[in-house]
Image: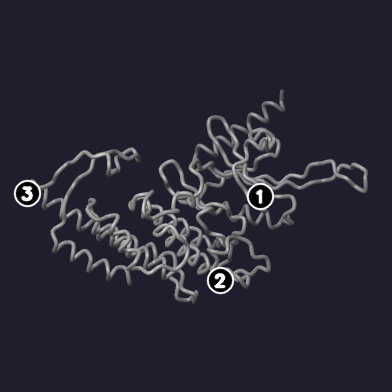
C-alpha cells in the first residue's frame, strides 16, 4: 500500500510540473518513466537519433516526451548533471519546457564469455513537454505554397526570440536546425534537442570539441574544425531563416526572394508591408550566414530589427486605419481565404480591408530600409 501511495505521489508531482508552467523541474524515477511509456514500448517511440530515443508518455490527462539517452553514448555522470543544470536555467515560450530528469543504475542480464551475469547499467533520461505538431522541417519545404507569410514571419521571430534567451543564459545550442525546432497546435516554434548544448561561464566565448555531430548543412564553417560560438548558432539561424523563406538551404539573393514573395502576396491585404518584412528577414538571414563570424549579427540586434519593423508597420497601419475610419472607408469583408487573429489565439475568417495611400507606403518603405540596416 505504501509503495502505491508513493508511486501516486510521484505521478502527481510530475503532472503538477507539467500543468504549472512556473513549477521547477523535478527528479523522476526510472520506474515512473517506464510506467508512463509502457516500458519504453516501440509503439510509444516518436523519434530519436544516434544518441537518444524519444518516447511519448501519458501523465494523468497530459502528455510528455521522454528522451532516453543511448547506453552506447559514453556520458560521464558529471556531464549529465551539467546538462540538467543547463536545462534548469531555461524557461521561455519558444523553447521546449524541461520537466524532469532521471539518472539511475539498475541490474541487467549481460553475456560474459558465454555466461549470463547481472551487470550494472546506468540510465539517463530527460523529460520534456510533448509538442504535438512535430518538427518545423515538414512545414517549410516549399515557399510557393503552404504556410502563409504571416505564419512564417511569426515562426522566424519566435525562433530568434528563443535563441536570444539561450544566449542570454550563456547557452550554445550547437545543433540548431528545423528538425530540432518543434511547433505546437498554434504553430508556435519551440527550440528543442540540447543534446550537444554547452553552458559557458561569463568569461568563456567559445567551446571546442573533437567530435562533430549534427546536420552539416546548418553548421558554420568554423564548426567543422570543432569550434562553437554564439556566432555559430547565428549562422545556423541564418540557414533556417533562408529555408523558411525559400524552402531551400543555402545562400539566396535578396531581390530574387522578394520578387518571388511579391508574386505570391500581391493583391492581398497589407502586401506592401508584408513584402518589407520579407526583405528585412532575407537580409538578416544572409548576414547571419557571413563566413566571417565577426560580421554576423548578434541575437539581440536581430530582435531589435524585427521589433522596429513591427512598430513601423503598426504605426503606419494604425494611422491609415484611423483616417479611413474618419472618412468611412473601412470595409469589413468576410472571406474564408484570408485568416485574421481573434482573441482566443485561434484564427477566424473575418478581416479588415484597408488600402494604404501611396505616400504612406513610400514613407513606410523608406523607414523600413533604414531599419533593416541599423
Tell me the quarter of the picture where residue 339 sits.
top left
Of the two numbered discs 2 and 3 on the same chain, state the one appearing first in sequence: 2
- The quarter of the picture where the N terminus appears is top right
Q: CA distance from mark 2 to mark 1?
A: 28 Å
Q: Is residue 89 left or right of residue 103?
A: left
Residue 316: x, y in percent?
20, 58
* Residue receiving disc 2: 205
Q: Is residue 350 left or right of residue 171?
A: left
Of the two numbered discs 1 and 3 on the same chain, state the one appearing first in sequence: 1
Q: Say if mark 1 contacts mark 3, CB within 8 Å.
A: no
- The quarter of the picture where the C terminus appears is bottom left
Residue 329: x, y in percent?
10, 47
Mark 2 vs mark 3, foreground winner is 3
For residue 191, above or below residue 308: above
Disc 2 secondary structure class: loop
Pick out the residue farthest to the left: 327
Pick out the residue farthest to the top: 1
* Residue receiving disc 1: 52
For residue 242, above or below residue 58: below
Which is more toward the observer, 1 or 288? 288
Residue 244: x, y in percent?
42, 57
10 Å crowding of disc 2: few (<14), some (14-19), many (20+): few
* Residue receiving disc 3: 327
Q: Is residue 293 left or right of residue 84?
A: left
Q: CA distance from mark 2 to mark 3?
A: 57 Å
Disc 1 secondary structure class: strand
Amino acid at each position: 500500500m505504501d509503495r502505491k501511495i508513493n508511486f501516486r505521489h510521484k505521478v502527481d508531482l510530475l503532472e503538477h510540473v507539467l500543468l504549472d508552467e512556473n513549477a521547477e523541474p523535478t527528479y523522476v524515477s526510472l520506474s515512473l518513466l517506464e510506467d508512463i511509456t509502457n516500458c519504453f514500448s516501440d509503439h510509444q517511440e516518436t523519434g530519436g537519433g544516434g544518441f537518444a530515443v524519444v518516447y511519448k508518455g501519458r501523465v494523468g490527462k497530459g502528455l510528455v516526451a521522454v528522451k532516453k539517452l543511448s547506453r552506447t553514448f559514453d556520458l560521464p555522470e558529471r556531464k549529465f548533471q551539467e546538462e540538467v543544470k543547463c536545462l534548469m536555467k531555461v524557461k521561455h515560450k519558444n523553447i521546449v519546457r524541461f520537466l524532469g530528469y532521471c539518472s539511475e543504475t539498475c541490474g541487467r542480464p549481460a553475456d560474459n564469455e558465454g555466461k549470463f551475469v547481472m551487470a550494472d547499467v546506468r540510465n539517463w533520461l530527460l523529460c520534456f513537454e510533448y509538442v504535438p505538431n512535430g518538427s518545423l522541417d515538414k512545414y517549410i519545404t516549399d515557399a510557393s505554397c503552404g504556410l502563409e507569410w504571416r505564419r512564417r514571419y511569426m515562426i522566424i521571430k519566435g525562433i530568434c526570440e528563443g535563441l536570444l534567451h539561450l544566449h542570454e543564459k550563456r547557452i550554445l545550442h550547437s545543433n540548431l536546425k528545423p528538425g530540432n525546432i518543434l511547433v505546437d497546435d498554434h504553430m508556435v516554434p519551440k527550440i528543442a534537442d540540447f543534446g550537444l548544448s554547452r553552458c559557458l561561464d561569463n568569461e568563456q566565448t567559445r567551446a571546442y570539441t573533437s567530435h562533430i555531430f549534427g546536420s552539416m548543412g546548418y553548421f558554420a564553417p568554423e564548426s567543422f574544425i570543432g569550434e562553437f560560438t554564439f556566432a555559430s548558432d547565428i549562422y545556423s539561424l541564418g540557414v533556417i531563416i533562408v529555408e523558411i523563406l525559400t524552402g531551400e538551404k543555402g545562400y539566396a539573393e535578396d531581390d530574387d526572394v522578394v520578387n518571388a514573395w511579391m508574386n505570391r502576396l500581391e493583391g492581398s491585404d497589407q502586401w506592401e508591408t508584408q513584402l518589407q518584412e520579407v526583405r528585412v528577414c532575407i537580409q538578416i538571414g544572409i548576414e547571419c550566414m557571413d563566413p566571417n563570424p565577426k560580421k554576423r549579427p548578434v541575437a539581440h540586434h536581430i530582435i531589435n530589427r524585427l521589433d522596429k519593423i513591427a512598430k513601423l508597420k503598426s504605426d503606419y497601419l494604425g494611422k491609415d486605419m484611423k483616417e479611413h475610419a474618419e472618412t468611412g472607408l473601412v470595409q469589413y469583408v468576410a472571406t474564408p481565404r484570408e485568416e485574421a487573429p481573434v482573441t482566443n489565439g485561434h484564427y477566424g475568417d473575418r478581416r479588415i480591408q484597408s488600402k494604404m495611400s501611396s505616400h504612406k507606403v513610400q514613407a513606410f518603405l523608406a523607414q523600413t530600409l533604414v531599419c533593416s540596416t541599423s
